[in-house]
Image: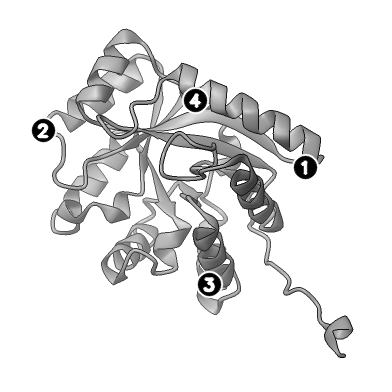
Amino acid sequence: MFNFFHKKKVVPKLFYTTDVHSHILPGIDHGSQSVEQSLEMLQAEMDMGISRVMCTSHVTAETFENTPATIKASHAILKEAVEEAGMNVTIEPSAEYRIDEYWNKEYAAGHVLPLPGSWLLLENSFQQELMEMDQLMFDVQCKGYRPILAHPERYGYYHVRRNRYEALHNAGVKFQINLLSLAGYFGHHARDIALWLIDNQNVDMLGSDMHNMDHAEVIIDYLRSRDWAKQAKRLEPVIINDQVK
């Protein structure tokens, strides 16, 4: 009988409006599996103050060998659904490129779909760093792209070689850490390194890396925490998400 007094919990708003890393496009990686799920995830983004979402579907050898064509096709379907639903959110088609043999082939052929402004979201192997990593980052920039390393806090081999963080960042590679990492979703090691990167002023962008509504709920809970309030004050002066255009 008292349900009428119940109010939905307020979702704290992020201090930026562009999510540079998400898996919201339906049916082309292990993120959203349907248009309906994508719309629900986009609503969660909007609840957090996001009005522009970079749809960075995985491009990975053997598992998700997406191309600009497959990404754009899924984006077109979701964009139409967003318009039909009257949602005030902009979605941009792009990708999160795993640096592997499929990437080498697609990159050599010019089959790359960067974020607006020629930003390129790149994901390292979780097993070991590419031997030619420095040369690749140099080559990417020579070709006019602006490399972003996705979630550097999650690569365990860098945890014991932290000088590599400084070397890559000084070489012009921007670092994007995950809100999920700060929330502790990937364990205390990833969270500790994310905080260390913040301490050392090596964080340029934040991303949701949202694959499903469970991720959205973890992030929303974290945004209500005192820790996020503390980290947000430190990050707001340096985060450049809204400059991706």
Q: Residues within 10 Å of mark 2 (few under 14, many from 20)?
A: few
Q: Position of residue 195 (x, y in %)?
A: 37, 65
Q: Marks 4/3: CA distance?
A: 37 Å
Which residue matches tag 4?
Answer: 71
Q: Nearer the viewer, residue 100 or 67?
A: 67
- Which element carries disc 1, helix, strand or loop? loop
Q: Amino acid at mark 3?
A: Lys
User: Which residue corresponds to mark 1?
Assistant: 87
Disc 3 marks which residue?
A: 230
* Amino acid marked by disc 2: Met
- Sort mark 3 into few (<14), some (14-19) or many (20+) by Cα contacts within 10 Å: few
> Which x, y percent locates residue 106?
31, 16
Looking at marks 1 and 3 on the same chain, the residue that comes earlier in the sequence is marked by 1
Residue 188 vertical position relative to residue 58 in the rendered view, above or below:
below
Q: Nearer the viewer, mark 3 or mark 2?
A: 2
Q: Amino acid at mark 4?
A: Ile
Q: Dot 1: few (<14), some (14–19), or many (≥20) neighbours within 10 Å?
A: some
The residue labelled by disc 2 is 131
Can you tell which of label 4 and label 3 is closer to the viewer? 4
Dot 3: element: helix
| Circle 4/circle 3 CB separation < 8 Å | no
- Compared across the picture, whether 10 is left or right of 14 comes to right
Cα–Cα span, label 4 and label 2 = 29 Å
